Image (spheres, grey):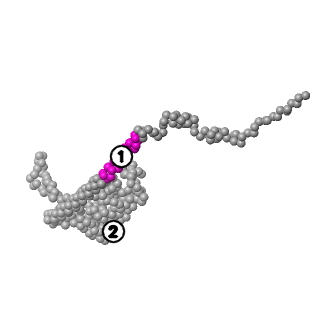
């Protein structure tokens, strides 16, 4: 009886330890994508990469030499033109300096001529003023004056910024706490009305022909800008002038600005204030034509003519 060998069961092989990392194994085994590998192989088969023939190598060398030549020429031109540009820049600076110096000299000449004209105008006032020459010179601002008077300081409110806004804008003003040209106009007119004999703002002498205007946020007196605080000096009977101004409508207006908008003001009587002469004068004279001059209606008139020195 034949013996049959038993069949031994081999069973299933044990799982690999990295079976759960098949994606990482695939990436490691195939680092180069198949498409890139095919393209690289095709380029090598067609003779790609660096040129292998002598002609191709000479062409590549010629291209590199040409590029180097272009870069070298550009650098040389920049180096050559740099001194030229610097020279032109220096010439432009010299021209600006020269023109600036010429403009400053012209301004000095204008100031000198203006002073000469003012001096001659003062001499004309003294010669033709007659018995009231001193009074005419005082009212016209031709001479500096000093004597008892008042000192009035007007300043913007604290922490006031330039620009519009606030209650005063709706009333025709451009800001709440800033002193405007119309405010200074009322102050000066109030001092004249209260008995001031001469007035100056920030050492700028005022006359009957002076103008107080605004240019943006600046106040101009006879076209000269002033900055706050505005110090107003007035010659007159100090205590009486201060009291009269405070009781006037313009003084009450200034008090209302202080109460409602925070504008800072102070007034004090002074024993001696000094005011300079006006920087420029406009002298006008008038002469009657005569009693016989009549209009077409037959009424007599005393016409006047104007002249300026």
What residue is rendered at 31% in x and 71% in y?
A: 271
Task: Check if residue 124 falls in the magenta segment.
Answer: no
Mark 2–mark 1 distance (CA, rounded to whole Å): 87 Å
> As rendered, which of 49 and 22 lies closer to the eye?
49
> As rendered, which of 16 and 213 lies closer to the eye?
16
Which stretch appears magenta?
58-82
Judge the density around disc 1: few (<14), some (14-19), many (≥20) Cα neighbours within 10 Å.
few
> As rendered, which of 199 and 4 lies closer to the eye?
4
What residue is rendered at 15% in x and 56% in y?
A: 307
What residue is rendered at 90% in x and 28% in y?
A: 1
* Residue 269 marker: 2
What residue is rendered at 40% in x and 40% in y?
A: 59
Q: Which residue lies furthest to the bottom in this view?
A: 271
Labels in figure, total: 2
How far from the left and from the top, in percent, is residue 201? 30, 62
Q: Which residue lies furthest to the right in this view?
A: 1
- List the residue tagged with mark 1: 69
Task: Check if residue 60 falls in the magenta segment.
Answer: yes
Dominant secondary-structure state across the stretch colored magenta: helix
Q: In which quarter of the image is the C terminus?
A: bottom left
How far from the left and from the top, in percent, is residue 76? 33, 50
């Amino acid at each position: 009886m034949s013996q049959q060998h038993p069949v031994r069961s081999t069973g299933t092989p044990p799982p690999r330890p990295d079976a759960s990392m098949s994606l990482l194994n695939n990436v490691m085994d195939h680092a180069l994508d198949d498409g890139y590998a095919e393209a690289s192989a095709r380029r090598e088969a067609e003779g790609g990469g660096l040129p292998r023939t002598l002609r191709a190598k000479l062409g590549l060398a010629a291209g590199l030499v040409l590029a180097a030549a272009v870069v070298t020429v550009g650098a040389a031109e920049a180096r050559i033109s740099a001194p030229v540009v610097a020279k032109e820049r220096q010439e432009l600076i010299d021209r600006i300096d020269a023109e600036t110096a010429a403009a400053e000299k012209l301004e000095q000449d204008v100031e000198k001529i203006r002073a000469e004209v003012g001096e001659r105008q003062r001499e004309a006032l003294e010669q033709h003023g007659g018995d009231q020459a001193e009074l005419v010179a005082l009212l016209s601002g031709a001479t500096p004056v000093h004597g008892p008077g008042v000192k009035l300081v007007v300043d913007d409110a604290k922490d006031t910024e330039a620009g519009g806004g606030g209650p005063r804008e709706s009333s025709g003003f451009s800001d709440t706490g800033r002193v405007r040209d119309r405010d200074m106009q009322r102050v000066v007119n109030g001092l004249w009305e209260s008995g001031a004999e001469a007035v100056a703002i920030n050492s700028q002498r005022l006359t009957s022909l002076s103008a107080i205007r605004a240019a943006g946020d600046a106040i101009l007196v006879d076209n000269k800008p002033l900055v706050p605080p505005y110090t107003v000096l007035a010659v007159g009977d100090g205590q009486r002038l201060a009291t009269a101004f405070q009781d006037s409508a313009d003084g009450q207006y200034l008090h209302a600005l202080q109460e409602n908008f925070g504008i800072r003001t102070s007034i004090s009587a002074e024993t001696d204030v000094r005011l300079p002469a006006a920087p420029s004068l406009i002298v006008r004279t008038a002469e009657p034509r005569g009693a016989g001059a009549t209009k077409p209606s037959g009424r007599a008139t005393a016409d006047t003519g104007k002249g300026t020195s």
